[in-house]
Amino acid sequence: MAKPNAPFLWVAVLTWLFLAGEALAAKHEFEITIEEAVVEVAPGLKYKVFAFNGQVPGPLIHVKEGDDLTVHVINNTSLAHTIHWHGVYQKNNWRNDGVPAITQEAIEPGESFTYHLKADKPGTLWYHCHVNVNEHVGVRGMWGPLIVDPKKPTRLEKKVTREAIMMLSSWESVYAEKFGEGGGPKDLADYFSINAHSFPLTQPIRLKEGDVLRVRFIGAGKEIHAMHSHGHDMLITHKDGLPLPKPYAVDTILIGPGERYDAIIMADNPGRFIFHDHVDPHVTNGGKYPGGAITIVEYEGVDRDDSWYVWKDKKYESDFFFGDSMEKGYGLFEQAVFKGEPLDARDRRRRR
């Protein structure tokens, strides 16, 4: 009897494993429109934005490592745009990287473009415009979260019970109503936000004792932020999507533009605790404290009815940190809490 050819068997096994992996990869097809809208960033500050599917931040895209994505982008605004898939490697796929004049022509008003990409990098990623990034990304809200679940999650990731995504950004009130301007090196940011809202228009993070909370920080704007959690340390487990070989504990984490950090918080200290940016001007609205990038951790069972408590009458929006959407599985998920007010034709004509 002839002996099996070992090299041939190995090639056959590896080929089978590769094909099996390709067969298991899900295929997603999404449509994203770019709209002109107005969002309320802070009390008294309404801001004109370019909004993915009419919202800022843009809709959550949640997929698995290795999935194939087809994204049809329709530009319904008066300026050109693209989408860059920040963190995706785009191996043998550079024409889908979303950089105008380098990988594609910009998507002109009324035009569309279809991106094809593979979710080849796991973790906390994001997507954003790459046209006039100083304005469109820096102060116009053109960004959203892209979360890619890894094929092999860490043991600690498997213990997570709550998810919270924080997209950190800033705004320049002088340009709130002026498309085509802002975000330059001489322009001053005077409002700061978590998920495009400044305190007190942010929302609480509600936990119960024993929860394992993962916070995914995304530096979506042009400022450096220093997020500080009262009452708890944070275990920094991932940087720019990838697991760290040696996670480390902090109570304040510095996040630069474009950076992402994953932090684990063990809910072991019931109470109410502020969670805020420790760059002091970033907790003001137009220079007035309190405001800006502030939220509050509220534990289940801890009273919220103190007469002096700033959020005792707060209307709770449970998907403000994308937690509800993350639990829905895989796909593109819109969040009603982030929808802006569409600009009508009269506004467009007056602006031109």
Image (spheres, rainbow, N blue to C red):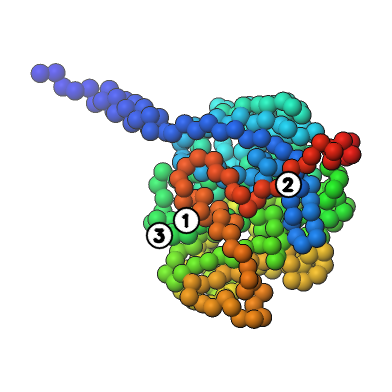
Find out whether the residues at labels 1 and 2 contact each other: C-beta distance under 8 Å: no
Residue 112 horizontal/vertical position (percent) = 68, 26
Q: Residue at x 42, y 69 (%)?
A: 210
Query: Up-down: is 154 above or below 105?
Result: below
Residue at the limit of the structure toward the left, as seen here: 1
Instruction: Give residue 326's position: percent from left, percent from top.
Output: 50, 50
Q: Position of residue 87 (x, y in %)?
A: 59, 42
Q: Report the residue marked by disc 1.
A: 245
Q: At 84% across and 41% down in the image, what residue appears?
A: 347
Q: Residues within 10 Å of mark 2 (few under 14, many from 20)?
A: some
Lower position in the chain sequence, tag 2 or tag 3: 3
The residue singled out by tag 2 in the image is: 341
**Image position of 56 (left or right of 302):** right
The answer to which quarter of the image holds residue 204 is bottom right
Mark 3 residue crowding within 10 angstroms, few (<14) / some (14–19) / many (20+)? few
Q: Nearer the viewer, mark 1 or mark 2?
A: 2
- Amino acid type, label 3: Lys
Label 2: element kind? strand
Q: Which residue is found at the position 34% from the left and 26% from the top?
A: 15
Give the secondary structure at mark 1.
Answer: strand
Residue found 43% across the figure and 56% down from its top: 157
Residue 28 position (above or below residue 8): below
Q: Which quadrant is the N terminus positioned in?
A: top left
Residue, far top: 2
**Distance between mark 2 and mark 3 Cα atoms:** 39 Å
Tell which tag, 2 or 3, sits nearer the viewer: 2
Q: Could you tell me residue 97's position as x and y percent?
A: 63, 32
Place residue 281 in its image quadrant.
bottom right
Of callouts 3 and 1, the N-terminal one: 3
Q: In this orientation, does residue 223 appear?
A: no
Q: Disc 1 and disc 2: Cα gap in Å?
A: 44 Å
195 relative position to 68: left or right: right
